[in-house]
Amino acid sequence: MANESGSTSTKLGTVTIQSNVAGTQLSFPVDLELSISTSPSGAKIGVVANVGLANLQNSFDSIAKSLPMPNDTSGYGTKIVASIESASLRPAGDTAVLEANVNVTVWQIEKGLPGGGTTVRWETRCVDLPWPIGRVCTNVPVTVEIQPGSDIKVELVKEGVNANVALSLATPDGTSLEIRPGSATVTPRGDIGKFINDVAGIFNQNLSARAQKEISEIVNDGTLRQALPKEILAFNPNIAGVQFLTRHDGSLGVLVDFRATLTPEQLTEWITKSIGK
């Protein structure tokens, strides 16, 4: 073997990982494939994990609608209320595209006019006048309560927007994974004027950022390492590459390439243990 080199690969099968996504328990299949290349200096072992995210795609609309959105109209000033009309996640090359239709209502709320809520309590008072007039009764004000009028609430804008952002995966240090969002595109379906930046902020913070967090929980390196064979984990493999991809059925997936380098002694020990099993 000292003068030989070569490579081989074999499928290790499929394992399933579980993850709680915004309160919804979902399962994700992980297809594993082992590759080994040998040389006089030792061996390089690789395990490619192909994670299927179809269950996340199928549940994404209901998950997105369950996420908290701005809906507080208390107090005064400009208030924006938003709700998710629809949301989806789809593959596009080596990225995942998050798309959403968001309905937005903008309110302007001000204090009521001074005295606009004033109430007067009246009582009937009677007096007896000399003949031929006799008794005369009339309503007279007894108390006056001066209060501000009801708050003034004006609907400035009620419109929908289409928004999307492409998400990519990266490994900054070879041991962890992170999601990197591109620039979000927010397109109003009507005129929302000066509120476009506020609406874009809602999409980025309330939906996109939360979705990124949930996806990170599914594909974080700790979770995926649990799917690897213990014999491979013993060599503490690094992450050589990671990306989103379109799986064979057209659904969204994640491909993570784990690599480890073995010395000739480690390779011999590993083979010996494998034969022993």
Image: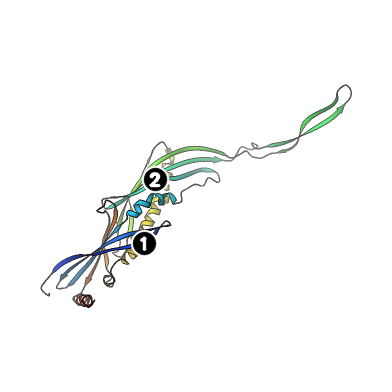
Question: Which quadrant of the structure image shows residue 18?
Answer: bottom left
Q: Which residue is mark 1?
A: 18
Q: Who is closer to the viewer here, 121 or 23?
A: 23
Question: Which quadrant of the structure image shows residue 45?
Answer: bottom left
- Amino acid, disc 2: Ser
Q: Quadrant of the C terminus?
A: bottom left
Judging from the image, what secondary structure is the residue with disc 2 in? Answer: strand
Q: Give me the disc on residue 265.
A: none
Q: Quadrant of the N terminus?
A: bottom left
Q: Which residue is mark 2?
A: 86
Judging from the image, what secondary structure is the residue with disc 1 in? Answer: strand
In the displayed structure image, the side of residue 243 where residue 204 appears, left or right: right
Mark found first going from the N terminus, 2 or 1? 1
Q: Position of residue 7 (x, y in %)?
A: 15, 67
Vertical relation: 243 (above or below) 229: above
Tell me the crowding category of disc 2: few under 14, some 14 to 19, or many 20 or more residues within 10 angstroms, Cα based. some
| Residue lying at 38% horizontally and 47% vertically, measured from the top left | 87
> Is residue 19 visible in this depiction of the protein?
yes
Q: How is the image coloured?
A: rainbow
